[in-house]
Amino acid sequence: MNHRPTLHFAIDDPGAPDIVPLIAQLDGYLAELYPTANIQPVSVEELRHPNVTFLTARVDGTPVACGACVDHGDYVEVKRMYVLPACRGLGLGKQLLEALERHVRTTGVRVIRLETGTAQAEALELYGRAGYRRCPPFGDHHANPQSICMEKVLHDPHRPAE
């Protein structure tokens, strides 16, 4: 009998023993892409703040992707999006981004912002296809030649688009 893998998205604890290695891989990936940048990884403690929702994608219980939403009141910032290299190219990043957006819609906030790097072509393509557009730096982000800030306005599914 063939076993078909099941994909499950859920809010998770970023400090869980099976999640910590995923976050460590993300940090290593960013350090490889931006070796001269002074990137300060987001700590597990920061990801556990009450205004942060940490989401994982699991295949048969194993975490293969993650992302976080940080509620800043008038906008939500998407952070820490990562898909394991072995799982890339399967549309998982798109599904994860859609799951994060569904969560944001439940908060009532309509503006999502994110910051990504110029070396992350796949991420830039994903965000562009999903309707994100470049915007000025926001929050703690500052103008940086290796950084791109983007935003998207979510439409209320119960109201026609304006």
Image: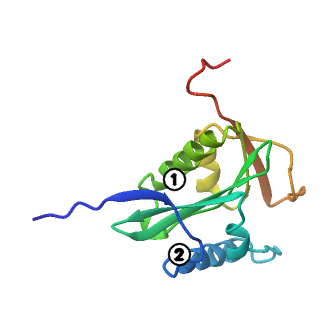
Q: In which quadrant will I find the C terminus?
A: top right
| Residue annotated with mark 2 | 19
Within the image, what quadrant is residue 45 found in? bottom right
Residue 141 position, x and y percent, is 86, 58
- Taking 156 as reference, is 118 left or right? right
Q: Nearer the viewer, residue 160 or 94?
A: 160
Residue 3 position, x and y percent, is 19, 64
Residue 73 position, x and y percent, is 79, 46
Q: Residues within 10 Å of mark 2 (few under 14, many from 20)?
A: some
| Residue annotated with mark 1 | 96
Within the image, what quadrant is residue 86 found in? bottom left
- Taking 85 as reference, is 24 left or right? right
Count of numbered badges drawn on the protein: 2
Taking the spot 81% from the left edge, 73% from the top edge, the residue there is 37
Q: Nearer the viewer, residue 15 or 4?
A: 15
* Structure colour scheme: rainbow
Q: In which quadrant will I find the N terminus?
A: bottom left
Q: Earlier in the sequence, mark 1 or mark 2?
A: 2
Image height of 55 relative to 46, above or below = above
The secondary structure type at the circle numbered 1 is helix
Amino acid carrying mark 1 in the image: Leu
Taking the spot 79% from the left edge, 50% from the top edge, the residue there is 72
The secondary structure type at the circle numbered 2 is loop
Image height of 61 relative to 139, above or below = below
Q: CA distance from mark 1 to mark 2?
A: 16 Å
Q: Do we see residue 42 in this rendering?
A: no
Residue 47 position, x and y percent, is 68, 68
Mark 1 vs mark 2: give the one in front: 2
Q: Nearer the viewer, residue 137 or 56?
A: 56
Q: Residues within 10 Å of mark 1 (few under 14, many from 20)?
A: many
Taking the spot 54% from the left edge, 80% from the top edge, the residue there is 21
